[in-house]
Image (tube, grey):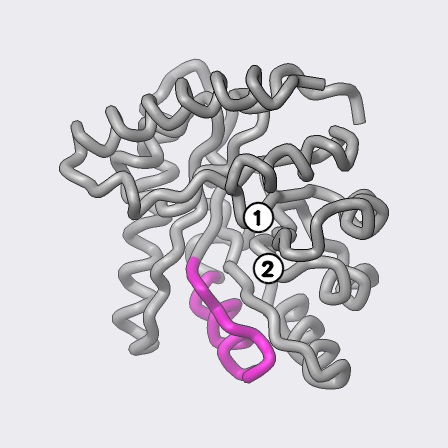
Amino acid sequence: MPTPEELKSRLDVLMGRVREACARSGRDPASVRVLPVTKTHPAEFAALAHALGFPAVAENRVQEAAQKRPLCPPGLRWELIGHLQSNKAKAALQTFDVIQSVDSAELAARLGRLAAEAGLTREVLIQVNSGRDPAKFGCELEEAPAVLEAALAWPALKVRGLMAVAPLSDDMAVADRAFSELRLCRDRLAQGFGVSLPELSMGMSGDLESAVTAGSTCLRVGSALFGARPSA
C-alpha cells in the first residue's frame, strides 16, 4: 500500500497532467474532478484518498463497496462505475450515493421505483457506449434518449449527466472519437429534454488528456494514484 507521502507525490504528478490538459484546452482545472478508483484495493486506500481531500471514491462491484464502506470515514461518498445487474439494484441504492452506470430504461425504472419505496434520492449518470465497443457496457447512442426519459420519470433519481468508457486501443484517436461522441450526445439530450446534464464522466489514467480536451468533468483514476491493481 502506498504511504501518504507516495500518494501525495502521485497526486501532484496527476494534477500536473490535468492542469496541462486544461491549459491546452482553455479550460479551468477547477471544472475537472478526479475520482479515485479503489476497486480491488483494501478499504485503507479509500481512507487514504479521503485524508488527501477527495470527497468521493469509485468502485465497480456492489458487494465489495458494501464491505469497505463501514470501514471508512462516514463523510466519504461512494460512486458505482461498474456494470449493475438489475437484481443488485436495491443493494446498490443502499451502498452508493451515485450510480454512474445506468445503461437501460429498465434499470432506470427499477432504480427509480426502489429508491422511491425506500425514501431515498440518488444521483445517477446514463452510461453510453459512445465508442460502440462490443466489449463495453452502456446503452447505444440511439438508445440514450429512452434511458434518460425513463430516469427523468422518477423524482428519486437526479440525473447528473453521462458516463462512458473508451474502447481499449493503442490509437488515441479511438478514445478521442468516443469522448467527442459522448459530449455531442449529452448536448443533444440536454437540448432535447430541456434539462441540465453538467457531468461528463469519461477518461482514466491512460487517456485523461483526451477526455479533458473533449470536455470531461470527472476523471476516474486508479493506477495513476494507487499503482498496479491487484487481481480481482
Which is nearer the eye, 230 or 13? Answer: 13
Residue 84 placement, left or right of 121: right
The picture places residue 109, in percent across and down from the top left corner, at: 65, 75
Q: Choose the circle earlier in sequence order: 1 or 2.
A: 1
Q: Is residue 145 magenta?
A: yes
Numbered mark located on residue 56 in the image? 1
Instruction: Give the magenta range.
Output: 144-161
| Residue drawn at x 74%, y 46% as measured from the top left | 72
Q: Is residue 71 magenta?
A: no
Three-letter amino acid code at disc 1? Answer: Ala
Circle 2 SS class: strand
What residue is pinned by disc 2? 98
Three-letter amino acid code at disc 2? Answer: Val
Residue 71 placement, left or right of 59: right
Foreground tag (1 vs 2): 1
The picture places residue 162, in percent across and down from the top left corner, at: 44, 55
Q: Do the residues labelled 1 and 2 touch (CB within 8 Å)?
A: yes
The picture places residue 68, in percent across and down from the top left corner, at: 80, 44
What whole-number distance in Å separates the C-alpha atoms at marks 1 and 2? 10 Å
The picture places residue 218, in percent across and down from the top left corner, at: 43, 44
